[in-house]
Image: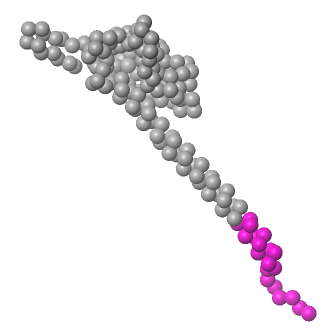
Amino acid sequence: MRRKKGFTLLECLIALIIMALITTLVSLQIRVIKSATVRSSAQPLDWYVCLTELESADHQFILERVEQQKLWLTSQRSGLTYELHATDRLYLSRENHGGYMLLFDDIKPGSVLFSELTGSRVAVKAERKNRQPILGVVKFYEKTNCQNEGGLCNIN
């Protein structure tokens, strides 16, 4: 008796199981790639928010002094002096009063460098914990020239 050429039921089941495993692995890999892409595209947004907070009209920070990992700022609104610290995060604290406001917390320790530029600007260079370099320039308010008689105040 002669056998017809073809696949047995067992061979078909094995092929289906292998295809299902390959499909599952590929779909899991696609999910990982998508989540990593979403995470990396969202990263600049939190850095932008941090820099925008420093330039905010709510505070109107004036740059007083710059060191490599610390800035001294004065708020034109309140007249209070603040320190911007750079450790494994960026945070503002009131000078000699305790308490702080966290601005950014995804920084590799010791990687932040402040550099003073012209026109009340500071370059902020850092590295994230995932080794992604981040860079920004913050433009602080300049000191005001207020005229007490007319009550006019020029903010540059």
From where the camera sits, is residue 143 visible? Answer: yes
Q: Where is residue 126 in the image (x, y as percent from the top left)?
A: 50, 24
Q: Can you name the residue that lies furthest to the right here?
A: 1
Left of 120 or right of it: where is 108? right
Q: Position of residue 99 (x, y in %)?
A: 44, 15
Q: Depth check: 115 or 32 in front?
A: 32
Please name the residue shown 57% across and 49% down the image. Answer: 33
Q: Does the magenta stretch include residue 30?
A: no
Please identify the quarter of the rendering in which residue 23 is found.
Answer: bottom right
Q: In this view, does 32 lie above or below 128?
A: below
Left of 3 or right of it: where is 133? left
Q: Can you name the residue that lies furthest to the top here?
A: 96
Q: Quadrant of the N terminus?
A: bottom right
Please identify the quarter of the rendering in which residue 114 is found.
Answer: top left
Please identify the quarter of the rendering in which residue 124 is found.
Answer: top left
Please name the residue shown 69% across and 65% down the image. Answer: 20
Q: Can you name the residue that lies furthest to the bottom here?
A: 1
Please name the residue shown 66% across and 59% down the image. Answer: 24
Q: Depth check: 20 or 101 in front?
A: 101
| Numbered range of the magenta stretch | 1-19
Left of 100 or right of it: where is 34? right
Please name the residue shown 79% across and 83% down the image. Answer: 6
Q: In which quarter of the image is the C terminus?
A: top left
Q: Is residue 4 magenta?
A: yes
Q: Position of residue 145 (x, y in %)?
A: 18, 11
From where the camera sits, is residue 125 visible? Answer: no
Left of 3 or right of it: where is 66? left
Q: Can you name the residue that lies furthest to the left here?
A: 150
